[in-house]
Image: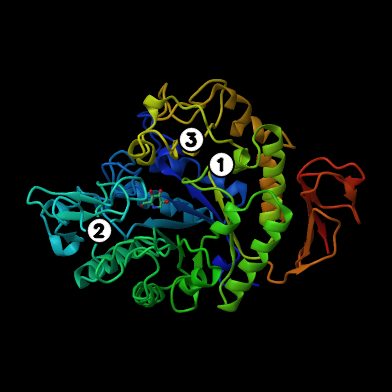
């Protein structure tokens, strides 16, 4: 399948730079920290790394509030650290995808500081009230009032004013930003809030509508058609992956229909409970929607915005066992898969972070009603018996790490043939691009499908079922049967 673009079947590892590895001892991860761990990622067997934002930012939203798109924030290092990391990644055979955040900037961005109002969405209010009834996705009104009495729109935090994508200067600026990173040699972009840049004409009240007036407007597709041309003008197989939320897989598929972006995250898969009927339905719908437009399906279980799946699937040993089974299910499917840092260690969500260490705007703006996303962003445990487990040369990490993670460090798992880490390593060594897919008959509660590589059987039911042949890989120890919450790969 050498003639097929790499991203169609790639396994892409998400690095959340604040929490991956700290080289300089400030307790926050950084780019030299990433460089130092590239050998680990190459050994894990992934094809590419997607880095969440490391640009200049006041870090109101963990770097998704960008103040300068063409520079690295000092907390993460320098541009030359980025170049060094990219060169080293390419040397060990890893592609690098960076995050692009086009829906909004930081309020510290020069445009906002210089009060360039045409670049943003400013409106007059209705008396003392905001221009419309839109709510911020982090809670509270989506509008903030400035000194002259007008209001600006922010779908997220007030520190993240929304850009006005009907202004050609905004489009030109983002073309230049894409070129800046493509010229440096990146292999692609993850597009933040890809469905949100164009707001409905006239900014109508949401009222009782369920279709959000800032989602998936027709004109947003023009932007991606232009981006695709720009990206295709570069040599090599550069790619893009869209963060699009829509309950209709066919609407998501429009973003990857040939002349737009390359992939979209499969949030239906991420949101599916550990339930065979639901998962089967999601797999069918995803394969069909992407297949209709000739795009690869993607699969994802966790990311920096969601509760980690070990916890979602029940936590404790049950959650861990299901997460192992889910990993082999995901990696056995055709298409491309995304692995969030730490899932290869089986890390759970940290549910008991003390209030005073939480920094996520979701937590802050909901007045503590929403737990927020800090619990899935706790730094990775690399080695040693006590926090910060080799994450940082300092004594502390920016979020505290649970002492019991001593048993989950990379160093411990590397030496244990049955660890989650070694399960991912083995799966990624055996995995090959697959395009064919067919369900096979199976007992109740079992998902069984065949690709040109493997017969994959996942038992999500409550009792063991017979196994046809000896598998090449199993997510948990087998008897002569396939026990509950276990997935196997059988060579076909
Ligand atoms: C999606 C990102 O994944 C999330 O972390 C961020 O808060 C919002 N977009 C706003 O940029």
Given contact means CB atoms under 8 Å apart, are the residues at marks 1 and 3 in contact? yes
Answer whether residue 431 is visible to the viewer in this image: no
Residue 329 in which image quadrant:
bottom right
Left-right relation of 106 to 52:
left
- Judging depth in this view, the residue of 247 and 167 nearest the camera is 247
What secondary structure is marked by label 3? helix
Kindly report the distance in space between the C-alpha atoms of the residues bearing marks 2 and 1: 35 Å
Q: Which residue is drawn at 57% across and 21% down?
A: 385
Mark-to-mark CA distance, 1 and 3:
8 Å
Mark sitting earlier along the chain (3/2): 2
On residue 375, which mark appears?
A: 3
Task: Tell me the crowding category of disc 1: few under 14, some 14 to 19, or many 20 or more residues within 10 angstroms, Cα based.
Answer: many
- Where does residue 14 sit, x and y in percent of width and height? 50, 50
Residue 332 x/y as whole percent: 71, 58
Res. 68 visible in picture: yes
Residue position marked by numbered label 2 in the rendering: 132
Instruction: For the residues labelled 3 and 2, say whether their Cβ atoms are less than 8 Å apart.
Output: no
- Mark 1 highlights which residue? 308
Badge 2, how many Cα within 10 Å: few under 14, some, many 20+? Answer: some
Q: Position of residue 486 (x, y in %)?
A: 78, 46
Q: Is residue 243 above or below residue 304?
A: below
| Disc 2 residue lies near ligand 1 with CB under 8 A | no
| Image: 336 above or below 51 | below
Q: Which residue is at a point 55% across and 22% down the rendered structure image?
A: 403
Which residue occupies the foreground of this view, 218 or 101?
218
Side (left or right) of 353 relative to 432: left
Q: Which residue is drawn at 47% across and 40% down?
A: 36
Q: Which of 206 and 101 is in front in this view?
A: 206
């Amino acid at each position: 399948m050498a003639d097929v673009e790499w991203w169609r079947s790639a396994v892409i590892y998400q690095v959340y730079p604040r929490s991956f590895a700290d080289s300089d001892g400030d307790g926050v991860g950084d780019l030299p920290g990433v460089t130092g761990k590239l050998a680990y990622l190459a050994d894990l067997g992934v094809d590419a790394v997607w880095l969440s934002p490391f640009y200049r930012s006041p870090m109101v939203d963990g770097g998704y509030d960008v103040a300068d798109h063409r520079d690295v924030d000092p907390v993460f290092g320098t541009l030359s650290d980025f170049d060094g990391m990219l060169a080293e990644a390419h040397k060990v055979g890893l592609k690098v995808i960076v995050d692009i955040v086009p829906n909004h900037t930081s309020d510290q961005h020069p445009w906002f500081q210089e009060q360039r109002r045409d670049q943003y969405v400013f409106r007059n209010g209705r008396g003392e009230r905001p221009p419309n009834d839109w709510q911020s996705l982090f809670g509270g009104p989506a509008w903030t009032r400035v000194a002259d009495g007008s209001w600006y729109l922010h779908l997220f935090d007030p520190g993240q004013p929304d850009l006005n994508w009907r202004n050609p200067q905004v489009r030109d600026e983002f073309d230049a930003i894409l070129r800046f990173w493509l010229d440096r040699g990146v292999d692609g972009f993850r597009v933040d809030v890809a469905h949100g840049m164009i707001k409905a004409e006239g900014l109508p009240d949401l009222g009782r509508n369920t279709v959000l007036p800032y989602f998936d407007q027709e004109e947003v597709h023009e932007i991606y058609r232009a981006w695709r041309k720009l990206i295709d003008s570069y040599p090599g197989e550069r790619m893009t992956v869209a963060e699009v939320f829509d309950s209709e897989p066919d609407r998501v598929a429009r973003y990857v229909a040939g002349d737009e972006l390359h992939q979209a995250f499969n949030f239906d898969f991420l949101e599916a409970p550990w339930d065979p009927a639901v998962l089967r339905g999601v797999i069918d719908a995803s394969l069909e929607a992407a297949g209709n437009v000739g795009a690869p399906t993607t699969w994802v279980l966790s990311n920096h915005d969601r509760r980690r799946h070990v916890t979602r699937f029940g936590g404790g040993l049950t959650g861990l066992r299901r997460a192992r089974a889910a990993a082999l299910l995901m990696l056995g499917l055709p298409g491309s898969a995304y692995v969030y840092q730490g899932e290869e260690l089986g890390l759970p969500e940290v549910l008991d972070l003390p209030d005073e260490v939480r920094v996520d705007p979701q937590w802050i703006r909901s007045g503590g009603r929403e737990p927020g996303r800090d619990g899935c962003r706790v730094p990775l445990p690399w080695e040693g018996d006590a926090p910060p487990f080799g994450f940082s040369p300092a004594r502390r990490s920016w979020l505290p790490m649970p002492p019991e993670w001593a048993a989950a460090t990379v160093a411990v798992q590397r030496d244990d043939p049955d660890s989650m880490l070694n399960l991912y390593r083995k799966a990624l060594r055996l995995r090959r691009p697959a395009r064919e897919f067919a369900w096979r008959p199976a007992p109740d509660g079992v998902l069984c499908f065949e690709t040109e590589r493997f017969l994959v059987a996942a038992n999500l039911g409550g009792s063991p079922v017979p196994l046809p042949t000896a598998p090449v890989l199993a997510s948990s120890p087998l008897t002569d049967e396939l026990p509950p919450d276990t997935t196997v790969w059988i060579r076909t």
